[in-house]
Amino acid sequence: MDVRRAGGRYRGGDPAAGVETRHAFSFGPHYDPDNLRFGALIACNEERLAPGAGFDEHPHSHTELVTWVVEGELTHRDSRGHGTLVRPGDVQRLSAAAGVRHVERNDGAGPLTFVQMWLAPLDPGGDPVYEVVRGIADATPYAVPEAGAMLHVRRLVAGERTALPDAPRLYVHVVRGTVRLGPHELGPGDAVRAADEKGHELSAAGGPAEVLVWELSA
């Protein structure tokens, strides 16, 4: 079980333009050959966009992009004609497949914070796919079969416990609050990478918490 703290993330983005990014994996100029991926997961970026800031149109291919908004509203447009406002509680997925371009912006009056996770597909190519699940219920799994992965969103009240799935690999990312996993206390931005671990539980410590858990097939 590998614990990665929020303070150890790579700093990126363009703060002068209102974009602050914290990368969990090797990304762009922050190259680390020992931190390229964990199973299918190749990126877990915490993004903070000031009002009016964002990412101009840029391409993706052969990647599954899953976005979780923490605060504010994310304006998303892509080259396939989709235009969406993504809000807290929504799961957005863009399957880039053979290639797609998109824009991500904060067109609201307040700050925007979101977590974007990239997964490598089992088979490259195909046609791009876009979807948004509005207000996903607690503990409702969201499948990304193209990457052999399943996302579990857990919102815990103080003292609540939840079992983690038994899987070849688990990636746990704390969105808000404080949780305990075995002997480890984890806060916002902290993550755990677990391989071949079974029978573990998360518990909220001292208040409500929100956690993203990826169940990875390999």
Image (cartoon, helix red, strand yellow):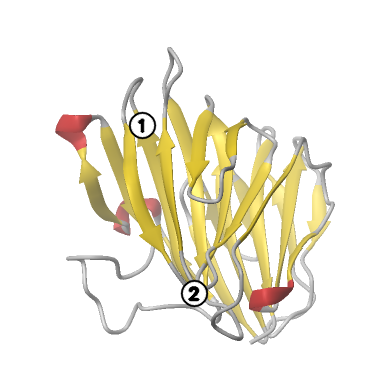
- Whether label 1 touches label 2, CB < 8 Å: no
Residue under the point 84% across and 52% down: 140
The amino acid marked with disc number 2 is His
C-alpha distance separating marks 1 and 2: 25 Å
For this orientation, the residue located farthest to the top is 109
Horizontal and vertical percent position of residue 159: 77, 41
Horizontal and vertical percent position of residue 92: 63, 47
Q: Helix, strand, or loop for circle 2?
A: loop
Q: Which residue is mark 2?
A: 62
Residue under the point 36% across and 20% down: 51
Q: Is residue 196 visible?
A: yes
Horizontal and vertical percent position of residue 214: 65, 66
Closer to us: mark 1 or mark 2?
A: 2
Of the numbered discs in the image, which one, if any, rests on residue 18? none
Q: Residues within 10 Å of mark 2 (few under 14, many from 20)?
A: many
Q: Is residue 12 above or below residue 172?
A: above
Q: Earlier in the sequence, mark 1 or mark 2?
A: 1
**Image quadrant where one finds the N terminus:** bottom right
Residue under the point 46% across and 48% down: 189
Query: Which residue occupies the foreground of this view, 179 or 102?
Result: 102
Q: Residues within 10 Å of mark 1 (few under 14, many from 20)?
A: many
Q: Is residue 57 above or below residue 117?
A: above
Q: Is residue 172 above or below residue 134?
A: below
Horizontal and vertical percent position of residue 119: 54, 70
Q: Which residue is mark 1?
A: 49
In the picture, measured across the screen, residue 80 lies left or right of residue 34, that is right
Q: Is residue 177 visible?
A: no
Residue under the point 67% across and 32% down: 207
**Image quadrant where one finds the C terminus:** bottom right
